[in-house]
Image: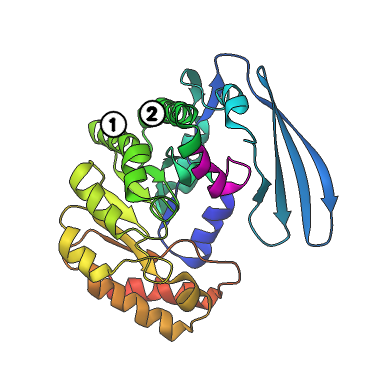
Amino acid sequence: EQAYIEAVKHFGFDGWSDKGALTVIPCRDPVTSKDRVLQWTDDQILVERVHRTPGGDLEEVIAFAIGDPPTKVGKMVKNLSEDLPKLAYFYPAEFQTDDRPLHQHMEAMGELGAVGGAVGLPGMTSFVDLFEGGLESAIFAYYDQPEEFAALVRLVHEHTIAYAQALLAAKPDFLLIGASGLLTLQSPAMVRELALPTIQALTSMAKEAGIPSHLHSCGKESWLVELCATETDLNSIEPLEEPPMGDCDLAEIKRTWGRRLALKGNLHTTSVMLHGTPAEVEEAAKKAMDSAAPGGGFVLSTGDQCGRDTPDANIFRLVETARKYGRY
């Protein structure tokens, strides 16, 4: 959290952090975890993490690369029927929480930006990192073990709703629904079945609490914009990626849904932010503002997070362009 705040100060952009978490305190036997280093090279550290539950152990392997985010290369669920009772300990529906981490982060951020809390969703967007074999294994489980899969979805849904209730009671600046690849990793029918009920519940709860709800789903998203605008109480959505990573036409989405949803995005993170020049960043930023700023309800941002090695000059130019041309 502090590193992010320092980045806000360094580049001068408006802070927006979803790291306002609550500490979850289980009401029953907690899961304990132990790490063992499997390999240590100049490029990465490979760690086996064993999670011990009253129902048995679950293991995963995580690669910590020297310059990239941690990646799960071995997943916890090897056999859903056998592992489901163990997973229940990861997704309790009853627990206590400590909201001090959220409020400490909000205090540290101060007037530099907004601090929200994040929740996930049941479905392939979460299960891709849970099942050994990734997305393919999760899809096979969906079709081959429908009862167990439905039980897992219920576990995640009930835990998510319980956590969101505690989070909203702690009054973050916003509620983020984190769902990377929500439509890219599963069909529209699966989104409706597995994720939409949770989105509807979360956005309704946030509306009742008077706290803005926001959805992140990188990849294909134009259909999700319509779904959320017409069937949920969502307030805003990001990152509205353009092809080839996404399928969004920012101007068209603004014309169609801009009176219903606030929009955040959508500068291309590789061709523009990583590989482009400052002049190209400025051009893309002006285009995005021209497309989505009229009438308000638009946050100029990148189409997902900036990749490693993105030039500082490009980020500075984005901020400068927003401050020069983005005032109402």
Q: Please state the total of marks drawn on the protein image.
A: 2
Decide whether residue 132 is among the magenta residues.
yes
Residue drawn where x is 39% and y is 75% of the image: 320
> Which residue is situated farthest in the top direction here?
28
- Helix, strand or loop: magenta stretch: helix
**Disc 2 vs disc 1: which is toward the camera?**
2
> Against 231, is 314 above or below?
below
* 37 within the magenta span: no
Q: Residue 317 — which label?
A: none
Above or below, 227 against 65 in this view is above
Residue lying at the far front in this picture: please name it. Answer: 144
Please state if 63 lies on the left or on the right of 87 as rendered: right
Residue 114 lies, with reference to residue 92, above or below; the image says below
**Dot 1 corresponds to which residue?**
205
Q: Are marks 2 and 1 in contact (CB under 8 Å)?
A: yes
Which percent across, then down, holds residue 116?
41, 43
Task: Determine whether the residue tagged by mark 2 lies in a helix, strand or loop.
Answer: helix
**In the image, 97: left or right of 238?**
right
Question: What type is the residue that disc 2 sits on?
Answer: Ile
Question: Label 1's element?
Answer: helix
Q: Residue at x 28, y 36 (%)?
A: 200
Amino acid type, callout 1? Met
Res 49 quadrant in image? top right
Q: Residues within 10 Å of mark 1 (few under 14, many from 20)?
A: some
| Magenta-highlighted residues | 129-142
10 Å crowding of disc 2: few (<14), some (14-19), many (20+): many
Q: Relative to 231, is 263 above or below?
A: below
Rendering coords of residue 248 (x, y %): 31, 66
User: Label 2, on which residue?
Assistant: 161
- State the quadrant of the C terminus: bottom left
Is residue 57 or residue 242 the one in the foreground? Answer: 57
Q: Position of residue 184 (x, y in %)?
A: 42, 56
